[in-house]
Structures are given as structure tokens and as C-alpha cells.
Amino acid sequence: MILTEPIISTFKDASQKLTGYRKRDFMAKVTEDYFDGSARQAETVLGWNRRTVQLGLDERRTGMMCVDNYQARGRHKTEEILPNIKADIQSLVDDQAQADPKLKSSFLYARISARAVREALVSQVGYDNSELPSRQTTGEILNRLGYRLKKHKKRNP
């Protein structure tokens, strides 16, 4: 059977809207019905990854679904990559921290900037500049640790 352009477009659009085993099952069903179970033909005509299609075909054949490990994707938090960084940051910032004067929150206010914390990690603790996160990420780590950076007021001359 020859697939027309609108049908091909519909199959591609439908597969993009699905995820995980549902997507693989859909791809496998289309491949069985229109391409005699050939993952290579589905790849050629529809542009689908043939390994994904083949996995869907195998899942349909065996009746067992593969578990997706979406949580393993992406970049890990700096605290996971550098396990000692939390303790090092706390040791640097605790001297500079003060409680909320109005006692409205449990956060500690750090009188040190994220840039200064990052520079202190390099100069005092001995981290390599290339292994440390950016200034912004350092500020986010400080926030996760319960510190809030004070906003420095601009002075007009």
C-alpha cells in the first residue's frame, strides 16, 4: 500500500504527541500494518528511529514493556557532582549570615555575594575554577541551602 503525504504527516504528528511505551506501540502497529513489520522501511518513509520501532515491535511480540528511565537524563545537580560543596559553602557563608531581623522567615541572609562565594571556593577551599558552577548556579545552591542573598542598594553620587 502506498502512503500519501497527508497520511504520512498524520502518522508523524500522532507519534510526536505520544511518549514512552505508547509511542513505541503506535510506531510498531503502523509498521506492522503498513510496512510488513520492517523497521527499516518505517525509518525510510516516516523518518522514525528504527531502533525505537524495533523495540516497539519486540514489546508487542513479547507482551513485555521496557521501563523508561527519564530521571537519568539531563544534567545532575552540582551537589551530586561535587558532594563536598554544600559543606564548603556553608563553612564560608555561616560567618557572613544573619537571621531575618523581622523574624518573618527562617532563612538566613548572607552578606556575601554569590560571586564572592565562588571566588572564595577557589582561593580558600582549593576548587578549580573550571569545575565550579557559574555565579548564578552558586546563588541557586545558596538558596537551596536556606540562604538569601541581600540586595545591595545602589547609591547615587
Image (tube, grey):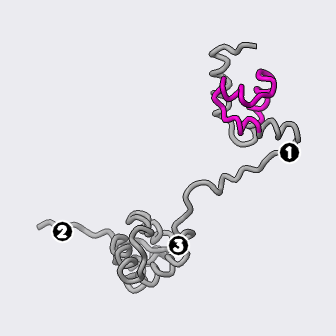
Q: Nearer the viewer, residue 40 or 103?
A: 40
Q: Residue at x 65, y 56 (%)?
A: 71
Above or below residue 55? Residue 7 is above
Magenta stretch, main secondary structure class: helix
In magenta, the rendered stretch is 25-54
Q: Of callouts 2 and 1, which one flags the residue occurring earlier in the amino acid sequence?
A: 1
Q: Residues within 10 Å of mark 2 (few under 14, many from 20)?
A: few
Which three-letter amino acid code belongs to the residue tagged 3? Leu
The numbered mark at residue 64 is 1
Q: Is residue 68 above or below residue 150?
A: above
Q: Position of residue 66 (x, y in %)?
A: 78, 47
- What residue is shown with label 3? 82
**Residue 7 in view (yes/no):** yes
- Number of residues whose C-alpha sits closer than 10 Å to that of mark 1, classed few (under 14), some (14–19) or many (20 or more): few
Between label 2 and label 1, give the one nearer the viewer: 1
Where residue 25 appears, as percent x and y from the top left, is 78, 35
Residue 155 bears which disc, if any?
2
